[in-house]
Image (cartoon, grey):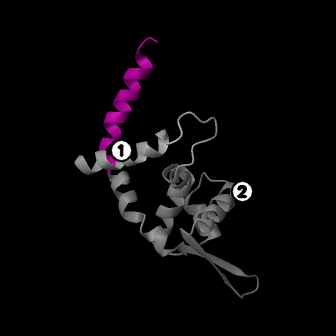
Amino acid sequence: MGTALSVIERFSRFQSDDAQSAEPVCCPVRDVLDRIGDKWSVLVIMTLATRPQRFSELRRAIRDISKRMLTQTLRDLERDGLITRHVYATKPPSVEYRLAPLGQSLLEPMASLVDWADRRYSDIHAARVRFDESPL
């Protein structure tokens, strides 16, 4: 727990650096978490962890994502250096996506979060039920 608290304290310094300013907080942690914290990015990264995949394979693997959202998510992840896009000179051109080394470095912490969510889901579900049933 000591390590977690030191990380949280370090993050808190970014939040309080300019507490009087009306400008948005410029925090590198928030900037990165905005990308990897959305559900589509996490699902794409987890899907590409197993092997490189084409757009249509990703779309089948993540059934509830729209083409537009998948395209945008892939562009954002590529822009951040988490995935790479490989175009093959075939007719029609074939495109494959794979995790970049930076994206691969995210798998271990992401696996810890997935494991935590899996182990704690029943606790979270029970808390939601209690909350929803309680009078406001």
**Mark 1 packing: few (<14 Cα in 10 Å), some, or many (20+)?**
few
Direction top: furthest residue: 135
Query: Pointer 1: what residue?
Result: 9
Residue 122 occupies which quadrant of the picture?
Answer: top left
Q: Amino acid at mark 2?
A: Arg
Q: Is residue 128 left or right of residue 90?
A: left
Query: Pointer 2: what residue?
Result: 68
Above or below residue 68? Residue 16 is: above
Q: CA distance from mark 2 to mark 1?
A: 38 Å
- Closest to the camera, between mark 2 and mark 1, is 1
Above or below residue 81? Residue 40 is: above
Q: Amino acid at mark 1?
A: Glu
Stretch in magenta: 116-136
Direction left: furthest residue: 2
Mark 1 falls on what kind of element?
Answer: helix
Q: Position of residue 118 (x, y in %)?
A: 34, 48
